[in-house]
Amino acid sequence: MADSPLNAALRHFEAAEANLNKTEKVLSEIEASIPSGIAFGGNPEYEANCRSFDALLTSLRKLTAGSPTSHLWTWTRSRSIDSMRQEVGESNA
């Protein structure tokens, strides 16, 4: 027995909602791992969460016909920018 279009749409919506919830959780973990000051060296947890975030966005794009899009900086790049901001006296906010 074939699914009705409504049931198929509901399953599609539920999958997108679940991935959005996962994406929000991973993004919160990424934000929590960013220190307020200058930090040197790598952060494997940050990098792993960024990979998870990218994978979740890829699956969302498949479910939602192309959106949303985003790009996260590598740990080294984000720390370099913070360092430059502090050198010129800018806030990280």
Image (spheres, grey):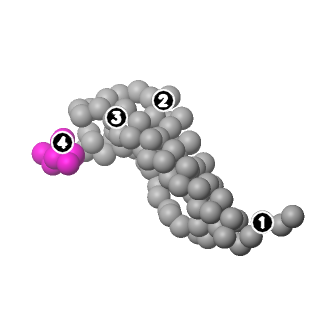
What amino acid is at disc 3? Ala
Q: For the magenta stretch, what is the residue range? A: 85-93
Check contact, mark 1 vs mark 4: CB within 8 A. no
Q: Residue furthest right?
A: 1
**Which circle's residue, 4 or 3, is located before the other in the chain?**
3
Residue at (47, 41) in percent of width and height: 26
Front disc: 3 or 2: 3
**Which circle's residue, 1 or 4, is located before the other in the chain?**
1
How crowded is the residue under tag 4: few (<14 C-alpha within 10 Å), some, or many (20+)? few
Q: Which residue is mark 1?
A: 3
**Which circle's residue, 2 or 4, is located before the other in the chain?**
2
**Which circle's residue, 3 or 2, is located before the other in the chain?**
3
What amino acid is at disc 2? Glu
What amino acid is at disc 4? Glu
Front disc: 2 or 4: 2
Q: Which residue is mark 3?
A: 32
Q: Which residue is mark 4?
A: 87
Q: Residue furthest left?
A: 89
**How far apart, in angstroms, are the residues tagged by discs 1 and 4?**
60 Å
Residue 14 visible within the image: yes
| Dot 2: element | helix
**How far apart, in angstroms, are the residues tagged by discs 3 and 2?**
11 Å
Front disc: 4 or 3: 3
Q: Please, is residue 29 above or below residue 92 in the view? A: above
**How far apart, in angstroms, are the residues tagged by discs 1 and 2?**
41 Å
| Dot 3: element | helix
Front disc: 3 or 1: 1
**How far apart, in angstroms, are the residues tagged by discs 2 and 4?**
27 Å
Front disc: 1 or 4: 1
